[in-house]
Image: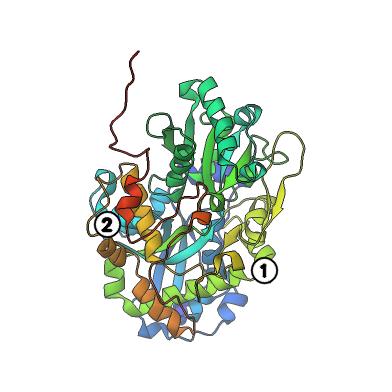
């Protein structure tokens, strides 16, 4: 079996900016197996010969989210659990998902809503049995706006001190005074939590995102350049593409808020596989999940954060400068601005890979990689709210159980000595959401119907 671990040449690439453009326009690129000594010195605790499929191709997208994949690869966690992995750099989140669907990838990270949306055939797509094995991380993203919104008077959300009315007044004021065709914002995929967050935020302040916003899909590496040339005025994406935009870096925007300020504790990225992968390769699946859990634990250690930021900065992964990758991982996040004022917020909650801070540890044994079925139901409620599916499905809980494999995660975590919450569902309290609206998973349809702005609501016309 030694031939499985043959050293290959490390992927080479252009500079960070050139690479970013290339990554967004070309197909996937392969990252060869890591070089010795560190990864190859790791002794497997699982014999590869006992696995149904020890050789795997796993995708990643060049954003900070790839950190656990980079760690599992470079630190030898894949090898530890008997896996010989080739990483494949994907040009976009659609590519990362579709690589699994069409069989090019064995596993890959996907945006959080894409698993259930794939199973339900959202937006007219052919249904596909995608499954989520675990959460890769929570938080780690932000909404960046261009200078025009800054000049209108908008400032980072935290400066409003929770006053949604005041913030809403500023945003509506800009909306009413600017041209309709100026309101072009971008997200990475329609089933991403960023899509739902952008719509949620606008609706919370009285702007109808269905009729008053043009929301486009843009790969992460194209966000900054498209904002610079005026193709869009705002975007929501994972780091390092928010940090890259601020003054002192590219200087084309400021971060309005992080996703955690819309929903504190939200899941961001999931590890996805085909349902048939779990059925055909159950031992391999367990090894894969264990390797990724251990990688997430490594990323979660504060002592490792700067090392992780440096690793992610390698050309093999994001190709971004350390000053771009570090804030989202270490936690020294700068919101930016155009008045030369420091807006640095140091918080371990910027990206959560495994351990949770006290503010999110209300449930015993909760941790970032655990799959909450209630989170899955919230995502489905938003897919229904914005017309991606006809309505909240009557068998929503069944779909959630089939899509998010919480049952298998518990078993695998237990084998690693990791305890999990005993329940699959929890209420998201009023304090979790920016608009103070709680989510009770026992009544997702009632929650959906409580919103004024949603797909399928008749328009009201007033005549004088």
Q: Residues within 10 Å of mark 2 (few under 14, many from 20)?
A: some
Residue drawn at 63 percent across, 71 percent down:
301
For this orientation, the residue located farthest to the front is: 464
In this orientation, does residue 97 appear? Answer: yes
For the residue pair 35 and 405, the one nearer the viewer reads as 405
**Distance Cα–Cα, label 2 vs label 1:** 37 Å
On screen, 390 above or below 281? Answer: above
| In-image side of 389 versus 182 (left or right) | left
Q: Secondary structure at mark 1?
A: helix
Q: Quadrant of residue 247?
A: top right
Pointer 2 and pointer 1: residues touching (CB < 8 Å)?
no
Per the image, the residue denoted by label 1 is 302
On screen, 458 above or below 331? Answer: above
In this orientation, does residue 35 appear? Answer: no
For this orientation, the residue located farthest to the top is: 464
Per the image, the residue denoted by label 2 is 119
User: Which label belongs to residue 272?
Assistant: none
For the residue pair 429 and 157, the one nearer the viewer reads as 429
């Amino acid at each position: 079996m030694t031939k499985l671990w043959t050293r290959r040449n490390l992927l080479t690439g252009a500079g960070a900016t050139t690479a970013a453009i290339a990554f967004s326009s070309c197909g996937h690129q392969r990252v060869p197996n890591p070089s010795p000594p560190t990864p190859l010195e790791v002794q497997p605790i699982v014999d590869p010969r006992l696995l149904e499929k020890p050789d795997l191709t796993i995708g990643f997208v060049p954003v900070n989210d790839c950190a656990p994949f980079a760690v599992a690869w470079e630190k030898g966690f894949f090898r530890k659990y008997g896996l010989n992995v080739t990483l494949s750099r994907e040009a976009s989140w659609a590519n990362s998902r579709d690589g699994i669907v069409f069989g090019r990838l064995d596993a890959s990270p996907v945006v959080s809503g894409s698993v259930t949306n794939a199973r339900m055939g959202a937006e007219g797509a052919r249904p596909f049995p995608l499954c989520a094995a675990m959460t890769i991380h929570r938080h780690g993203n932000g909404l960046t706006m261009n200078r025009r919104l800054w000049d209108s008077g908008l400032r980072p959300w935290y400066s409003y001190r929770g006053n949604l009315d005041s913030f809403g007044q500023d945003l509506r004021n800009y909306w009413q005074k600017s041209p309709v065709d100026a309101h072009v914002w971008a997200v990475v995929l329609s089933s991403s939590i960023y899509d739902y967050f952008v719509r949620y935020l606008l609706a919370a302040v009285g702007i109808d995102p269905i009729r008053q916003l043009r929301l486009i899909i843009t790969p992460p590496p194209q966000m900054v350049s498209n904002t610079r040339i005026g193709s869009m005025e705002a975007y929501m994406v994972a780091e390092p593409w928010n940090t890259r935009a601020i003054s002192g870096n590219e200087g084309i925007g400021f971060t309005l808020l992080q996703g955690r300020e819309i929903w504190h504790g939200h899941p961001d990225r999931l590890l996805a596989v085909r349902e048939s992968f779990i059925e055909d390769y159950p031992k391999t699946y367990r090894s894969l999940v264990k390797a990724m859990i251990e990688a997430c634990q490594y990323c979660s250690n504060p002592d490792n954060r700067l090392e992780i930021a440096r690793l992610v900065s390698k050309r093999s992964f994001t190709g971004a400068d350390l000053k771009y990758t570090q804030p989202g991982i270490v936690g020294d996040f700068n919101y930016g601005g155009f008045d030369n004022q420091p807006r640095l917020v140091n918080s371990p909650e910027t990206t959560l890979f495994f351990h949770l801070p006290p503010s999110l540890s209300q449930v015993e044994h909760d941790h970032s990689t655990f799959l909450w079925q209630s989170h899955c139901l919230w995502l489905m409620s938003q897919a229904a709210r914005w017309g991606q599916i006809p309505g909240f499905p009557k068998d929503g809980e069944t779909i959630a159980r089939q899509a998010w494999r919480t049952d298998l995660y518990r078993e695998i975590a237990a084998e690693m000595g990791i305890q999990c919450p005993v329940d699959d569902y929890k209420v998201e309290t009023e304090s979790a959401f920016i608009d103070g609206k709680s989510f009770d998973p026992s009544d997702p349809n009632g929650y959906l119907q409580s919103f004024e702005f949603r797909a399928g609501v008749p328009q009201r016309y007033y005549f004088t």
